[in-house]
Image (cartoon, coloured by chain):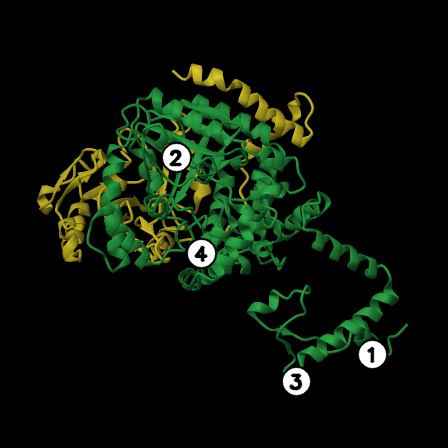
Amino acid sequence: MQVASIHFKERAHEKLNDAQLQKNLVKFKGKFVEARRRALTELDDADATRDYARDLRQRGLDALDVWLEMFERNATARGATVLWAETPADINRLVLEIASRHGAHKVIKSKSMVSEESALDHALEGAGHTVVETDLGEYILQINDYEPPSHIIGPALHKSKEEVSELFARKHGTPRKDDIEALCLEARHVLREHYLTADIGISGGNFFVAETGSVVLVTNEGNATLATTLPKVHIAISGIEKVVPTLEDIATLMRLLPRSATGQSISNYVDVLTGVKGDGEFHGAEHMYFIVVDSGRTSVLASDVKEALRCIRCGACMNHCPVYQNVGGHSYGWVYPGPIGSILTPMYVGLENAPDLPQASTLCNQCGIVCPVRIPLPDLQRKLREKEFEGGMRPWHERAGLKLWSWFAQRPALYGWASRIGVRHLHRLGGARGMIRKLPLGFGAGWTDERDMPAPAGRTFRELYKEAAARNGALR
Amino acid sequence: MSDDLLAGNAAARAAILGRVRRALGVVGEDAARHANAERYVAEHRAGPRPAMPADLGERFAQRAREMASTVERLASRDQIPHAVARYVDNLVVPASLAEQKTRTGVCWPEFADLDWAGAGLAIEPRPTQGHDRLGITGCFCALAETGTLVFTSGADTPTGTMLLPDTHIAVVRADRVVSGMEEGFALVRAERGHDWPRAINHVSGPSRTGDIEQTIVLGAHGPYRVHILLLG
């Protein structure tokens, strides 16, 4: 996928002014949040479960080479072929080689974020294959000329049913449907034929299991189950960080993944797929390939934001993010939006190509609080901000401003005097309403374009503290 | 058959594993790390989990209903055909889906001996190619925690029967209801350890999507409805 993260600010601005998108985002807001909260109460001890999940993901990463080798050994023993991809281009090359080896024409795909990283669909189509995305959201985006996904769980949640209805009528040549059920039924009919006639099924991999050499696939639609049951060839593509030691570890993660994602107790289909079909088995892949992908993961593992690799792609961080809720997923400009995207995107495509993403956060820590594997997202964002500052990647006025502030902050008397003048001036600007309508140019003037700023009460923290302390007789 | 693909891939494998080891600060072969990993796997340690009531069958039935399955309890196996006939007859489907209300379908071979004709049904013990509307299966086991059916693929348990028809009816023996996923996996190890199944499919209710405006619609790709006959 083309990286457009450099345009975050322009895009976010555009999206904030997109009335239809803002309407769709409002509909979206909150549903997952409340459902998640309720679902986690079903676990007797959700916090202990999350601690355990954090530790087991970390255990996987701390001996990643050992688990990958174990995974490979067990997968191979059951008749699968394990292939390694260093770059996105390697993923596409390997898939094309496999397709040509099996003389494949039609390829069906269940959701794979990693294949979005490499724009696999375009590579397959470019080589003359027919590609069909089967996740309903991904299918909607595919027939809309490969519109990029905006959310990792619901890739087309930014679209209204009217938009989908218009799209289906145009692309399927059918009458417009006015309800969501009819739209889903129409997609079901179109996709069913593809399942039955596809030569290759490509899936992502929510997890790889070292103990058994399996891939775990989680869906509600059952599309991954169909796409990996019917075609003769199955290719599962996922990142090296997705390897988990045991099936018991999967059981723990499955208590958290659906609850954190959509607030469900369990996803409707959870498949543990291992090797090729057995003797006399009617359905199932005769050839199974795993493509395990680096593509930036080892650099993350070597960095000080390595906790980000624990991510299980539930989407809770974006569902709870006030920035994501307002600018939508497309603003982030690549495969992974929201708080986790603001770490992974700069790490995978280069900080210089996504300089605004670590800044696209108020550091409110909603994301860190809800993360099922306790990734300290704001800490990681701050680390990337520091890297940007040290690398001279921030604009001159921001760097100058910080230097100026730091100079003052190191001179307490001067700082106290200057802030006294500052808050009194701002207090006066606030007038009787106590709201500032327009900040002076160069001091966050853009901020007050959209809203008023509450004015300070007119006295500094230090003044108030001194007064309170004197009142309580606690002044040293 | 994959030899040349693999041969061409050896360099990528070495490079990636090398980078992983460098990132982790691993120097040389360390037998202790592998031994630790083997030990952890052998332990099969389970994480924190919610307590389950003593009556697993009842908990399973309750959670299965919450996942939009329907459940009927039967006393004995020979009641299955009439229960299926009753279920089909009572199905209410919109006019546009009228063809889904059918007395014709397929079943797993373990139910070939039942008197389907006696209940007015035409059920064939064969796998489906994808155009049958009613599929009847057993299951490997079921999970009380989440109301989940567990299927292990094999010659006598074709996956398509629970996946492709519009209506899926699953027979669950009450003594095969276990607490949660951990017990399900332990059963697979115990009973299929030497013939590990290609697929362990966990199914909790009908196929569904919320991809348009987060509105839940049943029957996204797989069955529109799952009916469970809980035996014993």
- Say yes or no: labels 4 and 3 on the same chain: yes
Q: In screen coordinates, is B144 left or right of B88?
A: right
Q: Mark 3 highlights which residue?
A: A432
Q: How many marks?
A: 4
Direction front: furthest residue: A441
- Which chain did the renderer colour green? A
Q: Nearer the viewer, residue A87 or A14?
A: A14
Where is residue A374 drawn, in percent x and y?
Answer: 60, 50
Tell whether label 1 touches label 2 (CB within 8 Å). no
Q: Earlier in the sequence, mark 3 or mark 2?
A: 2
Residue sitting at 44 percent across and 46 percent down?
B180
Given the image, on which type of amino acid does mark 1 rest?
Answer: Glu
Q: Secondary structure at mark 3?
A: loop
Where is residue A421 drawn, in percent x and y?
Answer: 80, 73
Q: Nearer the viewer, residue A34 or A41?
A: A34
Q: Which mark is residue A263?
A: 4
Task: Identify whether A21 is placed above or below B205.
Answer: below
Specify few, some or many for label 3: CA neighbours under 10 Å numbering under 14, 14-19, or 20 or more: few
Q: CA distance from mark 2 to mark 4?
A: 33 Å
Q: In screen coordinates, is A219 left or right of A105?
A: right
Q: Which mark is residue A122?
A: 2
Q: Earlier in the sequence, mark 1 or mark 3?
A: 3
Q: Earlier in the sequence, mark 2 or mark 1?
A: 2
Q: Mark 1 highlights which residue?
A: A467
Q: Between tags 2 and 1, which lies in front?
A: 2
Q: Chain of mark 3?
A: A
Specify few, some or many for label 4: CA neighbours under 10 Å numbering under 14, 14-19, or 20 or more: many
Given the image, on which type of amino acid does mark 3 rest?
Answer: Ala
Residue sitting at 24 percent across and 55 percent down?
A182
